[in-house]
Amino acid sequence: MIDLREWVIAALVFIVSFTSVFVSRESRLSSSGSVSSADTVSLYLHTKTDIDELLSKLTEQGVHLDEKEALWAARLLGWRTFRKGHYSLSGDYSYDQLFTKFALGNQDPVSVTVLPGINQSRFSRNLSLIMHFDSSEVESVFEDSVFLAKAGFNKEELFGRMLPETYSIYWTSSPEAVVTRILEEFERKVTDQYAERLKEDNLTVDDIVTMASIVEWEAAFEEEKPRISGLYWNRLKRGMLLQADPTVNYAIGERRRLLFEDYAFEHPFNTYLNKGLPPAPITNPSLSSIEATINPEEHDFLYMVANPERGHIFTRTFAEHQVESEKWRRWLRQQYRIKRQREAAEAAQSNSSN
C-alpha cells in the first residue's frame, strides 16, 4: 500500500511534469523566434487559404519555420483558415503572432503610384497590375452613373482629380474604394488647401484642374510650368482663343506632332475652334502643375514655340512669334533631312551586305 509520502511525491512529480510541458508549449507558441524571415517577404493570398497551403507559400518565400511544429501550433490556437490579402513579413514572429495576423486578415498595404499626364485606360491598367481586380473594373467606375452622381463629377472631371502620388492602399480594396481614396487626397491637398485663394480669384476647382491638365501635357520641364500657365491665362484674359496644342491632341485621341489639318478637327475640346477652357480636364495633372496654374508667373507673353531642347521660346507679339516659329521649322526640316540621309545610308549598307 502506497503511503501518504509516496502519494505526495508522485503528485508533485506529475504536477511538475505537466507544468513543464505546458510552459514549454506555451513558450513555443509565444516565442518570437519560432518563425523568422531574414528578408522582407510579400505574400499574397488570393482566396481563403487553409493551413497546408499557407505553410507551403511561406516556405516557398524563404520563411524559416518547422512545419510539423507549425501545424501543431495552428491546431492548438484553433486557426484553420486564413483570409485573402497582402501580408508583409520581416524579422521574427511567434506562432501566435503569425497565425493571428493571417487569420484575422491584418493586412499590410501595398504602394500604388498614380502617374501624371496619363489617360484613363493607362490609369486602369496600372492599378490592375498592382491590385486584386481587373482593369475593366476600374474603367467601369468612371462609367458608373450612380458613383459619378454621388461624387458630383462627370468622368473627365473625376479622372482629372486622380492626383499623381504614391498611396498606401489595402490590396483587397475595391476599385470604387481606390478611386475614392485618391479623390479624398485631391480634396485634401487641392480643394481644401486652395478654397479661399480660388474664391478670391473668382475661379473654380474645375477651372484650375482643366488648365493644369493642359500645362501638364505642354511642359517638359517643371520650371516652365508657371510661365506656360501665365501665358494661357493671359490669352483668356484678353479674350483670345486658348489655342493649346494639347487640347487638339486630346481631341484626335493621339499625342503626336500635329498636322495642319488637325487644328481644324471639329471637337468640343479643340481650343483652336472653341473659346475659353475645354469642357473638362484632358488628363490628371500633377500637384506641381496645379500649383503652377494657381500661382502663374506674371508676364506679358502671349505666344510660345518649341525649341530643340524640348522647352519653349516665349514671345509677346505675333511678329516675334513668327520669327521664332520659322527658326523651329528650319530646325525640324534639318532633322528630317538628317534622318532621311541616315536611313538611305543604312539601306545602302544593308543592300551591299546582301
Image (cartoon, grey):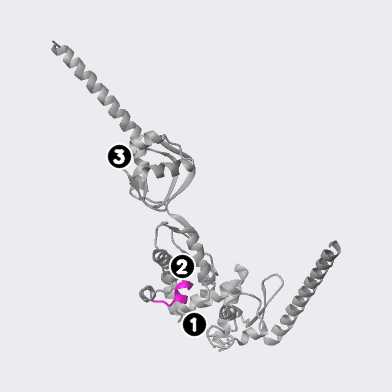
Ranked by sequence position, the earlier of labels 3 and 2 is 3
Determine the secondary structure under disc 3: helix
Ranked by sequence position, the earlier of labels 2 and 1 is 2
Q: Is residue 317 above or below residue 210?
A: below
Report the Cα–Cα distance between label 3 and label 1.
Answer: 60 Å
User: In which quadrant of the rendered view does residue 192 lie?
Assistant: bottom left
Q: Is residue 213 left or right of residue 51?
A: right
User: In which quadrant of the rendered view does residue 8 lie?
Assistant: top left
Magenta range is 152-161
Report which residue position mark 3 lands on. Answer: 77
Looking at the picture, how far across and down is residue 6, in whole percent? 18, 12
How many C-alpha atoms fall within 10 Å of the one at disc 1: few (<14), some, or many (≥20)?
Answer: some
Report which residue position mark 1 lands on. Answer: 279
Q: Does residue 7 appear in the picture of this structure?
A: yes
Report which residue position mark 2 lands on. Answer: 136
Q: Residue at x 42, y 68 (%)?
A: 183
How many C-alpha atoms fall within 10 Å of the one at disc 2: few (<14), some, or many (≥20)?
Answer: few
Looking at the picture, how far across and down is residue 274, in whole percent? 55, 88
Q: Residue at x 60, y 68 (%)?
A: 222
Q: Does residue 165 appear in the picture of this structure?
A: no
